[in-house]
Image: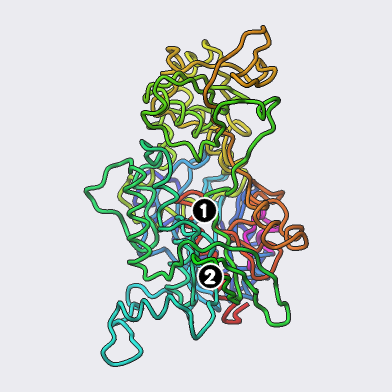
Amino acid sequence: MNRAVQFDVTEPAQERQIAEDWLDRFNDALERADQADLEDLLAPDGYWRDLLAHQWDFRALKGPHVIASTLIAEGRAKGVRDYRLHLDYSAPKFMTRSGRKVIEVFVDFVTALGTGSALVRLEKSQDGAYRAWGLMTSLQSLNAFPEAIGRHRPERVAVRAEGENWVDRLEQDRNFDTEEPEALVVGAGHSGLMIAARLKAMGVRTLVIESLPRVGDIWRNRYHTLQLHNEIDTIDFPYVSYPQTWPTYVPKDMYAAWMEFYALAMELPVWTSVRFMGAQRDEAAGNWTVRLSTPDGAERIVRPKHVVMATGGVSGRKKIPSLPGLDQFAGTVAHSADVRPTDEYRGKRAIVVGTSTSGHDIALELYQRGCDVTMVQRSPTTVVNIDPANLIYALYKEGRPIDEIDVVAIANDFDATIASYRDFARIVSEMDKDLLADLEKVGFRTHAGYLGGGYFANYIHRGGGYYLNVGASEYIVDGRIKLIQNERITTYEPDGARLDNGALLKADVVVLATGYHNQEVDIREYFGDAVADKVGMVWGWDEGGEIRRAWRPTGQEGLWIQLGGVPQSRTYSKLLALQIVAELRHLK
């Protein structure tokens, strides 16, 4: 029986009616467990991505039969029901997503444990019926442990004794003298601060440790002129926004100050100048024994039930390549993370190895400090001008609630994601065609990105391989920054790099802008081979089209990985916190 909605859409007012009728039939089919009717509401090539609403992981399914049967079986087991238009988000509206014209419908629903958000994308079929090409369901709150915001916020600051105030309580909470933290977050960058804020808002005793002296030092210590490459509209932290007077592209020291403020404003216990030395799992007790090195050189043991590794946006440890003869170089060799261009570089000669973002940024600043700079390209690089690059976040500039846009950001499965990235890459490549042609003319090898998906596909696939141009490309084109391909260097010598034609490229400094290892390196060192083998690879798409081990079960109980850029860290930190709370409070 064909129960799909059929309309000849000529007026925008009908979009809401189409969505409501589809939801009525969807709820009815679910309640009756009528698989045939449910299948008829789904497009033949449609997908369903579920994030914790039906099972405790991230997963995407394809095809009406598999989707319908799973929706019915798991929905009944988990009490998922009552799909309704989301009252706080935008009304149903025609949009183009991944090259397809759909009605995008924001939905909320309830489960046995809490509430969720869904996004349905209805596409008109050849028979005139509207069917769901895309469906995403995500758990957003737990009834028993809601976030302490809005109507759940505390009325007053809770203190333990008469005469105490907020500062007294903060000091007591940060010491953990009388109780263990339930969760330990390793790293106080944006990823660590975000998951800590989420956990605290859900009532989890959380300790954050940071190896540097101050929160934000990871940014203060980077090269002098650095600014964030994401526009400010996209980089809100959970629960707060930036001052409206702040610039579109935030300077690094301003961002560092924000992070320090955020830790205080969110009342996060952060131990600085404390290093994570390693951890062993006590399966019987269900916790970790974690060794920490304190500022005075002593060792402190904490026993959290959960450890969240947040030691880098995508990766942590510097990647140092083996380059022939580099150990014979008489000048300075430094990773780009350790280079702070100052006027002392004036008149010196620098070789910058690597042409991703750090390589370009360092090369540009060195040149502007009066240094003679040659970049060494080891592999093709995806280059996008900064303004077109940020069009990928255009939704965040529409004035809609950021939580609503974050729902859109997690709605695609792998195929829809790649399709949207390819569309975006084609648009920006056309916008940047003159720049790309000029780069190719001077021998710079450009790249269309992983699977043709541009720079953002590179970011997900490998965490690098791209440059968002803020000026260095023009310096390469006009020759102010010189360029050679890596294969032209036969070896490094005390005075520089010997080229294949016998010439010597003289240098005083070699900067290795060669990226970072993924977090599996940290996990193997800190937790041992057995745990590292359980976790496996980190980052990049897995065989199911989800990002490996990020924000979801790692294969090792009680060990989690929180990483990614600010928009991803913000969006997925809530989902990670929900999983930790569900385990701590025995809801799974």
Number of marks in the image? 2
Mark 2: secondary structure: helix
According to the picture, the residue beneath numbered tag 1 turns out to be: 410
Q: Give residue 576's quadrant in the image.
A: bottom right
Left or right side of 66 for 447: left
User: Residue at left 41%, top 32%?
Assistant: 341
Up-down: is 300 above or below 472? below
Q: For residue 176: magenta?
A: no
User: Residue at left 69%, top 25%?
Assistant: 325
User: Residue at left 53%, top 14%?
Assistant: 440
Left or right side of 476 for 300: right
Mark 1: secondary structure: loop
Magenta segment range? 56-69
Query: Which percent across, then down, holds residue 63?
Result: 68, 52
Q: Amino acid at mark 1?
A: Ile
According to the picture, the residue beneath numbered tag 2 turns out to be: 578
Left or right side of 153 for 339: right
Up-down: is 159 above or below 408? below
Query: Which percent across, then down, holds residue 188?
Result: 47, 59
Q: Give residue 515's quadrant in the image.
A: top right
The C terminus: image quadrant: bottom right
Up-down: is 373 above or below 577? above
Does the residue at mark 2 contact the one at mark 1 (Cβ under 8 Å)?
no
Query: Which percent across, then down, holds residue 71?
Result: 63, 65
The N terminus: image quadrant: bottom right
In front: 521, or 246?
A: 521
Query: Which percent across, then down, holds residue 559?
Result: 64, 66
